[in-house]
């Protein structure tokens, strides 16, 4: 049976687009360049793909469809079996779509707010829930997000490693990550309650006086060394809220970075009400790639879940 001419032309366009996206990047590739490579007019390209982002969505579609089918098959399985069905299947899908995934990893978020984008978000949330299991606590949900990342990111970054070797290494990492903690290493109750409760439980009464020696003991080793005034760098512009450079993703609690010793400073710092443009783009890339849940993105950017949702769903 011969292929339908229209289908053949569409496939040729997708292959040429993928090659050019790999050579020049999505944003620097025009529909005219794709047409010239195939000896087609721009009008002929637009007949099959009314906009360039439709090309990107079509290239991502097989990946999304395979992930949706995987999650559907795991949905009715017992918790432990579902967890490993998702993780092993997720990894196999990533490897099967290795080339387009590598080419489009940083451009998936550019498909806009259409159906494919929302399907990607839904796939990521479903995978995290199945891996974490029912009634999962904070630690289980964090580990689930990390496990998805462990079965995704190396596919993009280790392009010189064979599928067989990479698959074995990645599954080994996921198993180590999700292995039960030994009894003597189980989280203590105040650790499960969160960082704020841990700080309150470990604080000594005389620390409230704010003496320097006790502040050093409470804050732990500091990463910065004391530099004489004559050799200090000019101060970096910071925000009044958290003392971090504008646009930076906070990784260290301000109370630790500043060495604050009073009870008021040890409390959890306020969260910024909004994200900068670069942070919004980063959040959308992480969520669209399926490697981070909303909880993980909120923690990485230092904002609330509501703030992340607001920016993810904004037009």
Image (cartoon, helix red, strand yellow):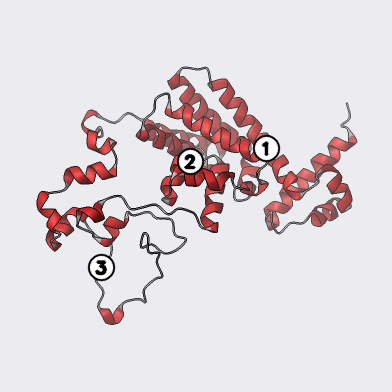
Q: Quadrant of residue 224?
A: bottom left
Among the 4 quarters of the image, the one containing residue 241: bottom left
Q: CA distance from mark 1 to mark 3?
A: 51 Å
Between discs 2 and 1, the one toward the N terminus: 1
Residue 225 bears which disc, if any? 3
Looking at the picture, tell me which residue is in the foreground, 293 or 103: 293
Question: What residue do we see at 48% from left, 54% from top?
Answer: 274
Q: Which mark is residue 148?
A: none
Q: Earlier in the sequence, mark 1 or mark 3?
A: 1
Left or right position of 121 against 270: right
Crowd tier of the residue under label 3, counting other residues whose Cα lies within 10 Å: few below 14, some 14–19, many 20 or above? few
Determine contact: label 2, label 3, CB under 8 Å.
no
Dot 1, crowdedness within 10 Å: few (<14), some or many (≥20)? few
Q: Is residue 235 left or right of residue 210?
A: right
Alpha carbons under labels 2 and 3: distance apart:
35 Å
x and y percentages locating residue 193 in the rendered image? 28, 37
Q: Using the rendered image of the protein, determine whether residue 219 is visible from the camera's viewpoint.
A: yes
The percent position of residue 131, horizontal first and vertical second, equals 46, 29
């Amino acid at each position: 049976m011969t292929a339908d001419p229209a289908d053949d032309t569409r496939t040729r366009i997708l292959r040429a687009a993928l090659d050019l996206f790999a050579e020049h990047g999505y944003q620097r590739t025009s529909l005219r360049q794709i047409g010239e490579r195939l000896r087609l007019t721009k009008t002929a390209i637009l007949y099959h793909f009314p906009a360039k982002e439709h090309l990107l969505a079509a290239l991502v579609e097989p990946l999304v469809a395979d992930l949706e089918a995987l999650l559907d098959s795991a949905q009715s399985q017992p918790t432990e079996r579902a967890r490993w069905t998702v993780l092993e299947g997720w990894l196999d899908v990533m490897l099967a779509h290795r080339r387009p995934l590598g080419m489009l990893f940083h451009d998936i978020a550019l498909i806009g707010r259409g159906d494919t984008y929302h399907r990607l978000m839904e796939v990521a949330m479903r995978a995290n829930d199945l891996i974490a299991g029912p009634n999962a606590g904070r630690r289980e949900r964090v580990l689930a997000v990390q496990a998805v990342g462990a079965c995704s990111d190396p596919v993009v970054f280790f392009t010189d490693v064979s599928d067989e070797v990479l698959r074995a290494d990645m599954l080994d990492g996921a198993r180590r990550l999700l292995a039960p903690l030994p009894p003597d290493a189980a989280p203590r109750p105040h650790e499960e309650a969160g960082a704020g409760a841990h700080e309150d439980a470990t604080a000594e009464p005389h620390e409230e006086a704010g003496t320097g020696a006790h502040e050093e003991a409470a804050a732990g080793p500091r990463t910065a060394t004391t530099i004489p005034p004559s050799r200090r760098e000019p101060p970096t512009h910071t925000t009044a809220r958290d003392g971090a450079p504008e646009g930076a993703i906070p990784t260290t609690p301000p109370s630790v970075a500043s060495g604050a010793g009073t009870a008021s400073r040890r409390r959890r710092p306020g969260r910024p009400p909004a994200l900068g443009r670069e942070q919004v783009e980063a959040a959308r890339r992480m969520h669209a790639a399926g490697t981070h849940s909303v909880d993980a993105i909120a923690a990485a950017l230092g904002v609330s879940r509501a703030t992340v949702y607001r920016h993810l769903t904004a037009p």
